[in-house]
C-alpha cells in the first residue's frame, strides 16, 4: 500500500486529506506542531476519527526542527498542507511566523524530499499569490502580484517547489486553492464566522462594503484535486477553484436562508491585504487533473451548517 505523509494533518484541510487517503487504503503519517493560531481543541477534534485508524499515525512535531529525512523514509507521496494561514494577521510583527512556517518549513521539506524517492510532492498554494489581478478570471499565466505578506510567503514557497522540480527533478505540483470552506473550516474564515453568528445571534463584523467577491471552493473538491494530483504530470502550478463566485452581500443572504436565522452585521472598512475579487479559471486543472468542482455553494454551505450544529464548535 502507498505511504503518504500529510503535513498540517490536524488543520482544516490537512485533516480532510488524511481522512480521504485512509479511505483509499494508504498508510498515512501526519505531522502537526499545533501552532497556537487557533484553539488546539478544534485540531484535536479534526483528527479524532483518523486516530482510531491503525493505518494512521500522528507525529506532533515541527517541520522547522524535526528529522525530515526520517519522516520521508519510504514515503511515496507528500501532501504539504502545513502553513501559517490568514491574510490580515500577516502584517507587522507576525510576519516572522509566516516566513518560518510557510517558507523555512517548505524549504527544509523540499531538501529532504529531493533525496527521497517520492512519486509526488503536492503543495497547498493559494489564490492570494494573485493579489488584485487586472483581468478576471485569473489563469496560471496571470502575473502573480500578492498584496499581502501572507501571499508573498505562499508565492515564495511555491517558487521553491517549482525550483526543486526544475533543478532536482522532484515531482512537485502546487495547487492554488481559492477560498476553501466546509466542515472544520477555521473559525476566523468568513463562512464559519458568519454561520457561528447565525447560531449565536451575536453581532459580527464584516470588512468592506460587501461588494467584494470570492471564488469559494468546497473542501471535498480540494481533497479530490489533491488525490488526482498524485497521478498528474506536466505543469507544476495549477488553480483549484470552486466555480462559485459570489459577492459577500449575496453570501450573507445565502447564509441567512440556509440557517433560517437573521445575521447582525457591523460593517468595518476593508482590511489591508484582502483582494477585492478572487475568481479563478479551472481549465488547466480540468486538462491536467480531470478536475471539476462538484459541490455548489448552496450544497456546501448546507453541509457546513449541519456540521456546525452536529459538532460542539
Ligand atoms: N483555508 C483556505 O481557504 C486556504 C486557501 C489557500 C491556501 N491554503 C493553504 O492550505 C494550507 C492549510 O490551510 P488550513 O486552512 O487548513 O489551515 P490550518 O491552520 O487549519 O492548518 C495548518 C496546520 O499546519 C500546522 N503547522 C503550521 N506550521 C507548522 C510547522 N512548522 N510544522 C508542523 N505543522 C505546522 C498548524 O498547526 C495547522 O494545524 C495552508 O498551507 C494554507 O496556506 C488555505
Image (cartoon, rainbow, N blue to C red):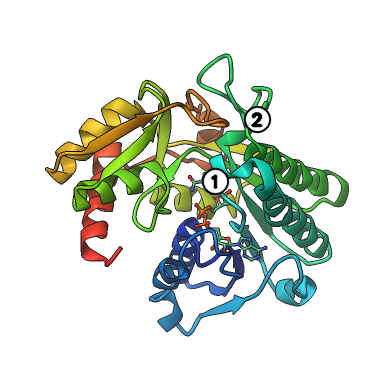
Residue position for label 1: 86
Task: Depth check: give the residue in front, 188 or 178.
Answer: 188
Secondary structure at numbered mark 2? loop
Task: Depth check: give the residue in front, 303 or 74.
Answer: 303
Please give left or right for residue 208 compared with residue 231 in the image: left
**Is residue 193 shown to the viewer in this render?**
yes
Label 2 CB less than 8 angstroms from ligand 1: no
Q: Which picture quadrant has residue 68?
A: bottom right
Does 214 sit above or below residue 181? above
> How crowded is the residue under tag 2: few (<14 C-alpha within 10 Å), some, or many (20+)?
many
Label 1 CB less than 8 angstroms from ligand 1: yes
Taking the spot 21% from the left edge, 46% from the top edge, the residue there is: 198
Does 178 sit above or below residue 13? above
In which quadrant of the rendered image does the N terminus lie? bottom right
Q: Position of residue 79 (x, y in %)?
A: 60, 59
Q: Position of residue 17 (x, y in %)?
A: 49, 61
Residue position for label 2: 146
Does 1 sit above or below residue 200? below
Q: Position of residue 257 (x, y in %)?
A: 15, 37
Amino acid at each position: 500500500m502507498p505511504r503518504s505523509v500529510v503535513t498540517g494533518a490536524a488543520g482544516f484541510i490537512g485533516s480532510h486529506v488524511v481522512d480521504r487517503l485512509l479511505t483509499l487504503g494508504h498508510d498515512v503519517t501526519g505531522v502537526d506542531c499545533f501552532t497556537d493560531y487557533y484553539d488546539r481543541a478544534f485540531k484535536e477534534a479534526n483528527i479524532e476519527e483518523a486516530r482510531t485508524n491503525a493505518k494512521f499515525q500522528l507525529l506532533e512535531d515541527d517541520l522547522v526542527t524535526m528529522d525530515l529525512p526520517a519522516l520521508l523514509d519510504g514515503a511515496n507521496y507528500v501532501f504539504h498542507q502545513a502553513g501559517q494561514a490568514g491574510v490580515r494577521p500577516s502584517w507587522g510583527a507576525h510576519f516572522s511566523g509566516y516566513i518560518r512556517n510557510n517558507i523555512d518549513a517548505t524549504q527544509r521539506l523540499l531538501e529532504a524530499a529531493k533525496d527521497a524517492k517520492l512519486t509526488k510532492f503536492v503543495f497547498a498554494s493559494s489564490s492570494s499569490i494573485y493579489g488584485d489581478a487586472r483581468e478576471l478570471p485569473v489563469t496560471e499565466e496571470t502575473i502573480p502580484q500578492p498584496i499581502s505578506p501572507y501571499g508573498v510567503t505562499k508565492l515564495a514557497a511555491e517558487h521553491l517547489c517549482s525550483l526543486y522540480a526544475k533543478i532536482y527533478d522532484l515531482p512537485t505540483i502546487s495547487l492554488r486553492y481559492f477560498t476553501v470552506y466546509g466542515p472544520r473550516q477555521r473559525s476566523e474564515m468568513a463562512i464559519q464566522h458568519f454561520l457561528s453568528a447565525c447560531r449565536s445571534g451575536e453581532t459580527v463584523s464584516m470588512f468592506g462594503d460587501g461588494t467584494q467577491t470570492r471564488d469559494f471552493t468546497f473542501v471535498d473538491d480540494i481533497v479530490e484535486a489533491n488525490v488526482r494530483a498524485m497521478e498528474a504530470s506536466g505543469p507544476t502550478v495549477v488553480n483549484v477553484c470552486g466555480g462559485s463566485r459570489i459577492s459577500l452581500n449575496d453570501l450573507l443572504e445565502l447564509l441567512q436562508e440556509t440557517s433560517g436565522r437573521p445575521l447582525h452585521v457591523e460593517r468595518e472598512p476593508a482590511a489591508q491585504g484582502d483582494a477585492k475579487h478572487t475568481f479563478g479559471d479551472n481549465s488547466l486543472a480540468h486538462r491536467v487533473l480531470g478536475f471539476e468542482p462538484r459541490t455548489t455553494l448552496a450544497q456546501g454551505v448546507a453541509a457546513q451548517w449541519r456540521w456546525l450544529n452536529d459538532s460542539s464548535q
